[in-house]
Amino acid sequence: GAVVSQHPSRVICKSGTSVKIECRSLDFQATTMFWYRQFPKQSLMLMATSNEGSKATYEQGVEKDKFLINHASLTLSTLTVTSAHPEDSSFYICSARSNTQYFGPGTRLTVL
Amino acid sequence: AQKITQTQPGMFVQEKEAVTLDCTYDTSDPSYGLFWYKQPSSGEMIFLIYQGSYDQQNATEGRYSLNFQKARKSANLVISASQLGDSAMYFCAMREEPSSFGNEKLTFGTGTRLTIIP
């Protein structure tokens, strides 16, 4: 099946710093990628839809200035958590669609 | 109202037995897709099976089958001959009619934690 990678897999940062997470589709081109957030023992919640070459579409309640999304190419989307705070600590998962929607392995962000 | 409902937060099943994970959904779109994903403790989301709203037959993938009852708006996952490696969180998800190709988002249920007992 299609492969989606994420980097880094785990990051610990200090409060106030910014963290960039990369999502790559390794063997297919994805004009659209999705970013989800998952809090412990909860379901995945869609944060935004990342569109190649255009602005991302954010879900209600998600701050676009805090979660910057850049979909610069057909195989790469990045999520930058700006001025991260402890409440941003979560598991962030991206997905991209080939014949179905494939998920990356996730990035666990811990903000101290 | 919840679009995807999984009423079983946790299940314990004896190894080699079959297990059914419940999922009901709510949509007014005539065209939609239903997915099941497995999430082991590592966190990755593993695609298991897909059912389209217009598919006449229930989807099957190896030991996984989807009991699709459209009138009841249910899409239960059946795992036959369960194995220890099946222990994980299982999420049901729905994709409603996309506005454009590729621009389709999934709505997830709250998940069921399945534990297989040796």
Image: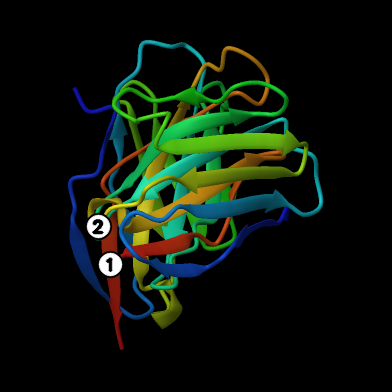
Residue under the image location 40 percent in, 56 percent down: A17
> Secondary structure under badge 2?
helix
Residue A37: x %, y % from top left: 38, 47
- Seen from the viewer's position, the closer of residues B93 and B83 is B93
- Identify the image quadrant of residue A12: bottom left
Residue B66 in the image, given as x and y percentages of width and height: 46, 45
Q: Chain of mark 1?
A: A
> Can residue A101 be spotted in the picture?
no
Among the 4 quarters of the image, the one containing residue B18: bottom left
Q: Residue furthest front?
A: A16
Mark nearer the N terminus (1 vs 2): 2
Q: Label 1: which residue?
A: A112
Tell me the quadrant of the picture where the N terminus of chain A can be found: bottom right
Image location of residue B85, percent across then percent down: 44, 78
Q: Is residue A78 left or right of residue A64?
A: right
Query: Can residue B14 be seen in the rendering of this structure?
Result: yes
Query: Dot 2 corresponds to which residue?
Result: A86
> In the picture provided, is B22 more to the left or to the right than B94?
left
Q: Residue at x 42, y 72 (%)?
A: B86
Q: Amino acid at mark 2?
A: Pro
B19 to the left or right of B100: left
Q: Residue at x 24, y 44 (%)?
A: B6
Q: What residue is at 43 percent from the left and 32 percent from the top?
A: B94
Where the C terminus of chain A falls, by quadrant? bottom left
Q: Please provide percent x and percent y for residue A52.
A: 71, 28
Residue closest to the eye, A81 or A105: A81
